[in-house]
Image: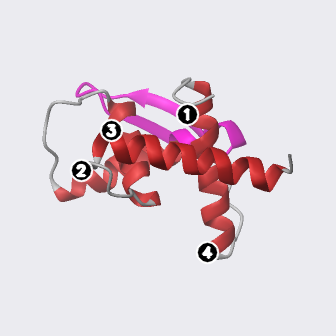
Amino acid sequence: MARDEQLKERWDLVVTKLSNQFADGDTLDLDAIIYLIGIQELGQLDRTFKKDQKLDLMHIAICKLLQPYGYYELDFVDNEGWPHYKALASLPHLKAGEQAILMKEAIVNYFLETEYIR
């Protein structure tokens, strides 16, 4: 199977599973999935977040997702349990479609590693 086809199949599986689990079957978009990963990485599942905290959660997720690519490294976790990352390399300048593909690939790899999908 071609790499692009495999990514598409795995991405569709991630979207379907997460949408069924968290959105009553409504289809989650890329940003919603990134947000869910941020909540998972923070580990504070039973609370509500303010708007600025939601943006911070998305930042946590993006850092975690791009860590295997060498862009970020976990620096420390503060006394409230929030992880902080430091940038190791500048992100490449990508077109919007290329950014989406990179993030989808990173998300698929994240859920393969956590064994949410196989």
Q: Which mark is residue 111?
A: 1
Q: CA distance from mark 2 to mark 1?
A: 23 Å
Is label 2 or label 1 in front? 1
Residue under the image location 29 percent in, 43 percent down: 22
Q: CA distance from mark 4 to mark 3?
A: 28 Å
Q: Earlier in the sequence, mark 4 or mark 2?
A: 2
- Residue linked to disc 2: 53
Residue under the image location 75 percent in, 47 percent down: 6
Residue 73 figure quarter = top right
What secondary structure is marked by label 4? helix
Q: Is residue 52 magenta?
A: no
Q: Position of residue 52 (x, y in %)?
A: 23, 57
Residue 89 located left or right of residue 61: right
Q: Residues within 10 Å of mark 1 (few under 14, many from 20)?
A: some
Q: In the image, is residue 88 above or below residue 91?
A: above
Q: Position of residue 21 (x, y in %)?
A: 33, 38
Amino acid type for the residue under numbered disc 2? Gln
Q: Earlier in the sequence, mark 2 or mark 1?
A: 2
Q: Is residue 84 magenta?
A: yes
Q: Which mark is residue 96?
A: 4
Q: CA distance from mark 1 to mark 3?
A: 14 Å
Q: Residue furthest bottom?
A: 95
Amino acid type for the residue under numbered disc 3? Gln
Q: Residues within 10 Å of mark 2 (few under 14, many from 20)?
A: few
Residue under the image location 67 percent in, 76 percent down: 95
| Circles 4 and 3: CB atoms closer than 8 Å | no
